[in-house]
Image: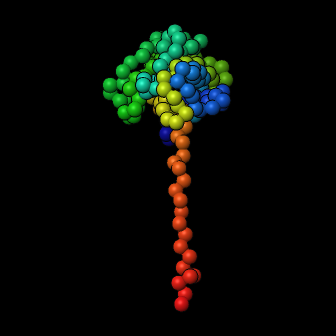
Amino acid sequence: PAEPTQEVYFDSSSLNSLSFKAGEELNLPILYTTSDNQNELSGLGLKVHYDSSKLAPSGDNNGVTTSLNNLGIGNYDDTDNLDKDTNTDKYISISWVDFMAKFPGGDLPAKLADIKFNVLSDLNSDTTKIRLSSSAPAENYSFKGADLQIGEVKPAEPTQEVYFDSSSLNS
């Protein structure tokens, strides 16, 4: 049987829109569940990957607010391309650890944290992805992270279509 997974995703339902202008702030709740509904594990090491030319963590703790016990929150260069996306060049690392194996406790899905970014370039005609990865899921668990694309790509101008009426060729 496949091993169970720890699943992390963004709650984008709180966003009015996915397009942002430079100078606006983006606040994203990070939600968590497990495939087997287990809410008492040893923790999770999470990396939130982003493009630093478009987004910058905002506020204390690299933009992260969490009420769960953690071993630290850091911001690093993604020199090893851990999320396999060359557009994301930085990541915020959050290590939640519970030595009593009660992570996260309570009902699932659970809110792990809020993360805030300042938008550095207009994302109403451009896009950026925020990706999730983990190098440290709980023992005997795999990790599944759902990426979030922010911004909008304007549709290309419609091309003019020319129709040829072959019925006029009948002689």
Residue located 37% across and 33% down the image? 86
Total numbered circles = 0
Q: Is residue 90 visible?
A: yes
Residue 98 seen anywhere in this rendered image of the structure: no
| Percent x, y of residue 17 | 63, 32
Rendered image coloring scheme: rainbow
Q: Nearer the viewer, residue 115 or 150?
A: 150
Name the one closer to the observer, 23 or 46: 23
Q: For residue 25, what is the image quadrant?
A: top right
Tell me the residue at 32%/25% (across/down): 79
Report whether 131 appears left or right of 27. Answer: left
Question: In the depicted view, which residue is nearer to us: 30 or 121?
Answer: 121
Tell which residue pokes out farthest to the top in this image: 60
- Is 118 left, or right, of 135 in this rendering? right
Query: Which residue occupies the extreme left position in the image?
Result: 79
- Tell me the quarter of the image containing the C terminus: bottom right
Please determine whether, in this image, residue 99 is positioned above or below residue 165.
above
- The image shows residue 66 at horizontal and vertical percentages of 57, 14
- Residue at image coords 35%, 30%: 81
* Place of residue 11 in the rendered image (x, y in percent of width and height, measured from the top left): 61, 28
Q: Could you say which is closer to the camera, residue 83 or residue 67?
A: 83
* Residue 8 sits in quarter: top right
Q: Report the side of 4 relative to 53 (left or right).
A: right
Determine the residue positioned at 42% across, 16% down: 75
User: In the rendering, at what x and y percent does residue 21 appear?
Assistant: 55, 26
